[in-house]
Amino acid sequence: MSQFRPQTADIAFTLEHVVGYSGVAALPGFEHADLNTVVDLLEQCGEFMAEVVGPTNRAGDVQGARRESDGRVVTSPGFKSAYRQYVDTGWGAVPLPEEFGGGGFPHTIGLAIQELMSTANVAFALCPLLTQGSIEALLHAGSDELKQRFLPKMVSGEWTGSMNLTEPQAGSDVGALTTRAVKRDDGSYAITGQKIYITYGDHDMAEQIVHLVLARLPGAPAGTKGISCFIVPKFLVNDDGSLGERNGVSALSLEHKLGIHGSPTCVLDYDDATGYLVGEENRGMQIMFVMMNSARVSVGMQAVGISERAYQQSLEFAQSRRQGRAIGATERDSAIIDFPDVRRMLMTQKTYLAAARRLMLLNAVYVDQSTHNPDAAVRARADELAGLLTPICKAFGSDLGNELTSLALQIHGGMGFIEETGAAQHYRDVRIMAIYEGTNGIQAADLVGRKLGVRGGDSARELIATMRGILPELAAAGGEFESIRHGLDAQLGALDTATEWMLRTGRADPNAVLAGSVPYLRMWGLCVGGWLLARSALAGAAVADSEQAETQLVMARFYAQQLLPACAGLLGAATAGADDLFALDVAQLSGAGRSTVSSQR
């Protein structure tokens, strides 16, 4: 498996020219986060991830985390040392509040760091990701006492965090959970129950793990309305901040998974464990959604990171693998990169990756504007846009992860199916991204059920109008941009048609809207990606770098001509309704109906 090259140059171009990072750097509190500073920081981070974290990726796959007979969970070779260096260098603290020892940099820069770390080793990156989500939940709803007790060492990375929602009988239906919380006389709670699929629920990289656990109080309302959120630390914390006795939480087993073998996914047992209420009773889902919304964009970016590494490996293989003779070649064997179909696959990877990266960073910029802009109207609109784009980021990004890592494997040919090349690892590792933090079907339902109807649909209509605003600029830019303008214009028309159908149909036939929600979300991802690449092409033409200008123009043109047209192709599926989905009963779906034989006499 090859090492990776950090994509800091494209991240820097995107921040400066495409997603409006200069507006973030001008916000109060971010004066120290100017573009030059963050580019230097990201370059240093990229070097660290490539040199320290990247080499652990293969070992994590081959020798995954394991649970010892005494119950200890041991991570893969190199993980513990790499994590120690990660903590010592402070990369995890960069986007976190200075009040608790963080660097106070924008969320946007934290997300860029997540991409670099996910490209290096996504199984490793999951631990800091879950910790950051736990920190955000505590910042949002934790009492001052809980913040002071837990946040400083979580921000530094000395302590890690986990998110505990799922139970054997309660997957996406979180309201079905049965973990119990009983209040004690001292104000703490006794937590009893079992949680499954808990990423980094136990490990040896940090001395303490701070679990955020959803549980139900006696007499609480049924469903999600009766769920509360608790901190349950692996070790109790003494008044002086030192670690005390082991709490009543243990890892019963580790899941045997398709991929991300280096990440210990635990079945956790809570047996009268001591927990502390976060926020108010029966408000746990609102608190957990703070974690989940942040994690959903991070999942999309993780898929970008894995796909980037898969792309780089397939590009390297395509240059070294010689087979057959390309048209016009003088040598008997050509490198397979000289064949049109291999070029098609490489360009598809490169261009989709650029579009997805820009989408994730745009979302992060809106998040920063929604939290730090002094203008209330700007904050409100940025919050709307971040909310609209979050399910698109998660679903479009992770769906692309499945497709692009598959293309990378395809370029390897038969060797891609052989584990030793490492191409299959990327394909296996990324597959979970479309499932966790809410399956992509749930993301699509969120888009059409919650986000699309904001302000009667005007929030989404205004974003489509904003994207259309680039068309006159493309027309004025010259003939080289004409196919980009034409393609974007046509596909925004298809998206507009689908959007109006969704808004018209939603109340009368919600099943019809849900039936088309997944292709509809894909239409959004395709169009936003095309818009951002068109912005990149215009920006590239304005910089004094002919190679950069050509790269951005070709990517935008390729996307507009070969990838974006899929949007209109999805219009029928998005608006077909649900009748045919339910037209066959279960017996017909299984093919178990009565056999019939026709004969001709």
Image: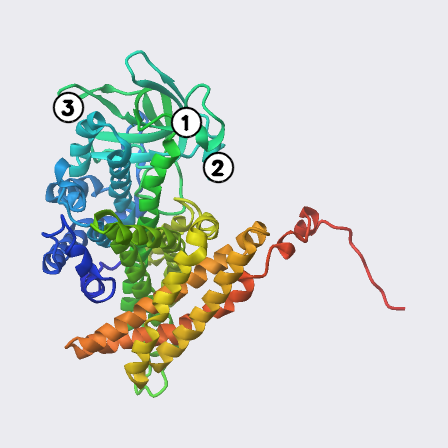
Residue of label 1: 194
Calculate the distance from the C-alpha at mark 3 to the C-alpha at mark 1: 28 Å
Residue contact between numbered discs 2 and 3, judged by CB atoms under 8 Å:
no
> What residue is at 16 percent from the left and 33 percent from the top?
153
Give the residue type that dot 1 points to.
Answer: Gln
> What residue is at 28 percent from the left and 33 percent from the top?
141
Disc 2: CA contacts within 10 A as few (<14), some (14-19) or many (>=20): few
Labels 2 and 3: the sequence-earlier one: 2
Residue contact between numbered discs 3 and 1, judged by CB atoms under 8 Å:
no
Rendering coords of residue 499 (x, y %): 48, 61
Disc 1: CA contacts within 10 A as few (<14), some (14-19) or many (>=20): many
Q: Nearer the viewer, residue 488 or 215?
A: 488
Calculate the distance from the C-alpha at mark 1 to the C-alpha at mark 2: 16 Å
Residue of label 2: 173
Rendering coords of residue 108 (x, y %): 22, 53
Q: Is residue 209 above or below residue 246?
A: below
Q: Nearer the viewer, residue 380 or 550?
A: 380
Query: To which quarter of the image does residue 40 belong?
Result: bottom left
Residue of label 3: 241
